[in-house]
Image (spheres, rainbow, N blue to C red):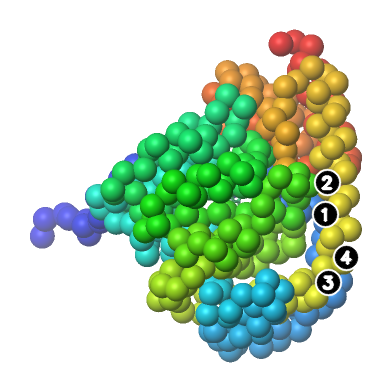
Amino acid sequence: MTEKSPKLRGALDGIPTYKPGKPAAADGPTAFKLSSNENPYPPLAGVLETATAAAASFNRYPDMACTALMAELAERFDVPPEHLATGTGSVGVAQQLVQSTAGPGDEVMYAWRSFEAYPIISQISGATSVRVPLTDGEVHDLDAMADAVTERTRLIFVCNPNNPTGTVVGRDGLTRFLDRVPNDVLVVLDEAYIEFIRDEQVPNGIELYRERPNVCVLRTFSKAYGLAGLRVGFAIAHEPVAAALRKTAVPFGVSQLAQDAAVASLRSEDALRERVEALVGERARVSEALAGQGWTVPTSQANFVWLRLGERTVDFAAACEAAGVVVRPFPGEGVRVTIGEDEANDIFLRVAEEFRKEL
Ligand SMILES: *Cc1c(COP(=O)(O)O)cnc(C)c1O
């Protein structure tokens, strides 16, 4: 027998692997993980209880239609349940959106640098990625993106606020952009961090979805809601996009723990809002301190800040790690640092101050 390995799709060659944020060192006296934009607060007591109760029946498959969660979301956002689709995190839903719209010969467009899942899921589909550089201010260049649309463009991601730069696009710019994009191109507004936005120029994507059949809004329970480990996100989209999401969903993808915890979180929003408010306060404190140290930091509307360090990126990340905080380096470009526990933010600021003096 000749040695042969199973034939895999050529599209998989060279797919960048998703780099998860590095965990904090287990042995350090103070080790904080500021590398994955997670919520630093432990689960709310009520939410934890609900999830624990759901665990008692994990010998059973979950409710495949996510009935209770869909009903809760439909009411909260005043959208028909048929326009909602849940998935294994919003990355799971994003992958279904790409699968539903783009294959070989088609183009998926997004800003760059932006969320690192976009190139991966585009390539898995066999689609061609079209990356449009951010402006000098680290913001989506929506004019350039509209200019880059071709007859092969099928889907455009707009990450608002943008991961990893934290920058936003406002209502006027986004509306102008949407007016220029052909109606048969799906525009996905990835609003993973919307709860952290305080800039009133930024629209809620759901407003834009209501008037535009080609706009889809992506949301997640992983960040502000603190359910990253449970993997649940959702999209709001018109038909036939929502129907496509139902077709491409992995059956039983969202566990009952995740469904029940998401419902409990939506019902505990006051408590969650307080935590988000505290993180937004910390974001202001960190941003001001960095500016005071002489750093140019793009205004962040998310739960992280971005330092463009270029060739010093890896050194800076190593200095942070040595001091007890793990950050997310993008070698040659910059470092993304999650707003975490106050103590962790203080450690990061001390490293930044020392590093600044050497630059
Ligand atoms: C974290 C993040 C998500 C959410 O991912 P989940 O799969 O829901 O955990 C989606 N989009 C962006 C831009 C993110 O940063």
Mark nearer the N terminus (3 vs 1): 3
Q: Read off the residue under disc 2.
A: 280
Q: Check the picture and name the quadrant holding the N terminus.
A: bottom left
Image quadrant holding the C terminus, namely: top right
Q: CA distance from mark 1 to mark 4?
A: 9 Å
Q: Callout 1, which amino acid? A: Val
Q: Answer few, some or many: residues within 10 Å of disc 2's Cα (few below 14, many 20 plus, some between 14 and 19).
A: many
**Dot 4 crowding, Cα within 10 Å, few <14, some 14–19, many 20+:** few
- Residue found 83% across the figure and 48% down from its top: 279
Q: Is residue 241 visible?
A: yes
Res. 268 mark: 3
Left or right of 277? Residue 295 is left
Residue that label 4 marks = 271
Q: Whole-Å distance between the Cαs marked 3 and 4?
A: 6 Å
Ligand 1 sits in which quadrant? Answer: bottom right
Residue 90 x %, y %: 56, 61
Label 3 with label 4: CB-CB less than 8 Å? yes
SS at circle 2: helix
Residue matched to label 1: 276
